[in-house]
Image (tube, rainbow, N blue to C red):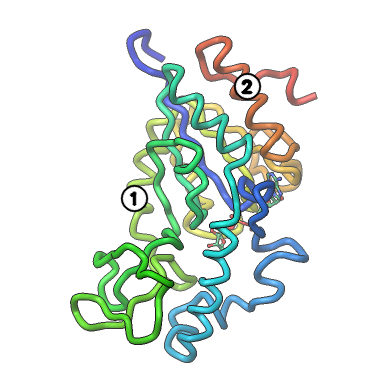
Amino acid sequence: MGESRQPHLVVFTGAGISAESGIQTFRASDGLWADHPVEEVATPGAWRRDPARVLRFYDARRDQVRRARPNPAHKALAALETQGFRVSIITQNIDDLHERAGSRRVLHLHGEVLKARSTVDPRLRYPLPRGGIRLGDVCDKGSQLRPDVVWFGEAVPLFADACELAAEADLLLVVGTSLAVMPAASLLEYAPFDAPCVLVDPEAEALAPPGVTRLSQPAGKGVPALVRHWRREGRLWVPETLLE
Ligand code: APR
């Protein structure tokens, strides 16, 4: 790490970082996919068959997001930016809690539920219409508006950008993800060989790939603890004492 260069923390977050804010994760036994089969609400086929149902599902996600507040994990990451660190966040989450905590560089790999996009052209993105997306709301090309989220079976347009960021990491911090979804989970492989990688997740022991340091704690505890060490020393490292 050069002296003149800001230490670059790249953070890769999943649903677990927002769990303590009251947003449901996906794959827990009481998670979202238990009550809402993926193929009925989060695929292009579901959208073709029953767009009203898909819109209702995302209306409910949006309500949950609006009621939620950033928790200490989101806030600690935002605070680090004000302390001479470069922090880039790559999130799989469609909520806006990183932004509301104050993080400035946030890449939404799987889109944003508070935005709308065209059905025929993913580049045509819009602020959410008042009252949410309704059947009959159309884009500039005349196609139905849909939530600006990436569904199963669709390409992940920002994946290459995310890989470029990961390749610049001095430390890759992974938080609250089961690493079950590709290509997102393969992001870890793009970090530089000598950059430490830490997973903060209550299930870290079971989930972390080889070579990844496991911090088996909820995000609201583990992330602020790491950030305190980094702020105190002005560098990114893995404090052994946290892992005991
Ligand atoms: N702190 C940190 N992690 C937590 C917490 C917490 N308080 N509570 C739960 N977790 C962890 C779980 O242990 C699990 O590993 O959060 C993870 C959530 O995993 P998933 O539900 O699979 O969510 P995620 O990995 O974000 O899913 C990836 O899959 O369904 C798609 O597009 C959706 O972006 C999503 C993608």
Q: Nearer the viewer, residue 68 or 4?
A: 68
| Quarter, ligand 1 | bottom right
Look at the numbered disc 2 and say if its residue's Cβ is closer than 8 Å to ligand 1.
no
Q: Position of residue 140 (x, y in %)?
A: 19, 75
Residue type (three-letter) at the residue carrying disc 2: Val
Total number of numbered labels?
2
The numbered dot on residue 160 is 1
Residue type (three-letter) at the residue carrying disc 1: Ala
- Residue at (71% x, 33% y) in the render: 221
Left or right: residue 159 versus residue 187 is: left
- Residue at (51% x, 14% y) in the render: 235
Q: Quadrant of residue 130?
A: bottom left
The residue pinned by badge 2 equals 238
Q: Quadrant of the C terminus?
A: top right
Q: Quadrant of residue 125?
A: bottom left
The disc, 1 or 2, on the residue closer to the chain's N-terminal end is 1
